[in-house]
């Protein structure tokens, strides 16, 4: 089993445990490894240190939010050149996050402005920042890294997939597309899966997303087909420990009639092949 979406302390938000404590829970559960994610800093160094000390495959990456300079090619080059494997397009600082009134760094200090980030087609194609988006996409392709869509809108996810296919980026993950952000419909998710996108469903959605049910997540899983990826997106104090959260997601989807073996592949072999070199 390999979890592609895990949060740990230290972080801006409170977490259930520090990196080493989260790692110990995965060892106890018999996992091979996980991807360590943070919204406001690169996790590459933390992941490397934990991997060396624990024996797990711990993968780091960078989320392109304002704390790292937004969609910042220099930060991406640094992360990928030091062993990072995953680049998330804007999450906590995406314009969708602001519109949905979901947590942002600016919530901690009113002196920070509320500007938010986007990519085309929300961002104007002639915006000077569009050059940085193109540079980041080229870096992901050159390093054979994983492009995760983050919290940008469905239209932006579609544009990112178009760009990934044009550049030969083979590792592309729709970040929880049925979550509040981006809030994509099942038919849209199915279309992008057919074009090559992997589709993430998270245990966080089951525990915390308003109105979400196991039946609705099962419909997304069926739309994803063989491109389904299951993750925990756990680490919150009000969620189970991440390995237990992922097991509960698998059990809930199996109770909806989905094949347990396929679900375990979606939480093991499939994400491992997506992320690991």
Image: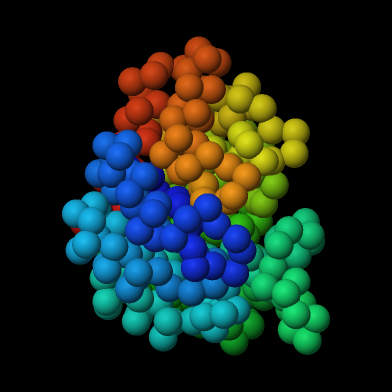
Question: Image check: 107 left or right of 72?
Answer: right
Q: Is residue 143 visible?
A: no
Q: Nearer the viewer, residue 160 or 92?
A: 92
Report the number of discs.
Answer: 0
x, y percent for residue 14: 60, 60
Residue 31: percent from left, percent from top: 29, 40
| Colouring method of the image | rainbow
**Viewport quadrant of the N terminus:** top left
Whether residue 261 is situated above or below residue 34 in the rendered picture: above
Q: Is residue 151 visible?
A: yes
* Residue 99 appears left or right of 143: right
Q: Is residue 117 above or below residue 260?
A: below
Task: From the top left corner, tell me how far across and down residue 45 is, in percent.
Answer: 33, 73
Q: Quadrant of residue 210?
A: top right
Q: Is residue 269 above or below residue 16?
A: above
User: Is 129 above or below relative to 210?
Assistant: below
Residue drawn 39% across the image and 19% down it: 260
Question: Which residue is at a point 45% across and 35% down the rendered structure image?
Answer: 244
Q: Position of residue 208 (x, y in %)?
A: 67, 41
Question: Who is closer to the viewer here, 106 or 18?
Answer: 18
Q: Out of 62 and 30, give the one closest to the viewer.
A: 30
Q: In terms of image quadrants, where is residue 129?
A: bottom right
Residue depicted at x 27% and y 68%: 49
Residue 237 shown left or right of residue 148 in the figure: right
| Image quarter (top left, top right, bottom left or bottom right) of the C terminus | bottom left
Instruction: Name the foreground residue: 138 vs 147.
Output: 147
Q: Residue at x 54, y 67 (%)?
A: 11
């Amino acid at each position: 089993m390999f979890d592609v979406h895990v949060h740990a302390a230290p972080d801006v938000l409170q977490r259930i445990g520090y990196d080493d404590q989260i790692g110990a829970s995965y060892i106890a559960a018999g996992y091979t490894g996980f991807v360590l994610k943070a919204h406001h800093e690169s996790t590459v160094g933390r992941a490397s240190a934990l991997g060396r000390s624990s024996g797990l495959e711990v993968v780091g990456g960078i989320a392109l939010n304002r704390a790292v300079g937004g969609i910042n090619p220099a930060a991406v080059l640094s992360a990928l050149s030091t062993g990072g494997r995953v680049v998330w397009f804007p999450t906590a600082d995406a314009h969708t996050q602001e519109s949905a009134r979901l947590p942002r760094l600016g919530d901690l200090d009113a002196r920070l402005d509320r500007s938010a980030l986007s990519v085309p087609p929300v961002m104007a194609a002639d915006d000077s920042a569009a050059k940085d988006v193109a540079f980041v996409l080229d870096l992901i392709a050159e390093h054979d890294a994983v492009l995760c869509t983050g919290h940008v809108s469905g239209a932006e996810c579609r544009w990112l997939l178009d760009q990934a296919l044009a550049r030969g980026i083979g590792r592309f993950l729709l970040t929880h597309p049925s979550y509040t952000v981006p809030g994509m419909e099942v038919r849209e998710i199915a279309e992008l899966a057919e074009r090559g996108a992997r589709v993430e469903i998270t245990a966080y959605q089951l525990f915390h997303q308003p109105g979400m049910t196991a039946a609705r997540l099962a419909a997304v899983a069926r739309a994803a087909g063989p491109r389904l990826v299951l993750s925990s997106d756990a680490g919150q104090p009000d969620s189970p420990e991440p390995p237990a959260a992922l097991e509960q997601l698998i059990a809930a989807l199996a109770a909806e009639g989905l094949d347990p073996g396929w679900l375990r592949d979606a939480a093991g072999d499939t994400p491992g092949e997506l992320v690991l070199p």
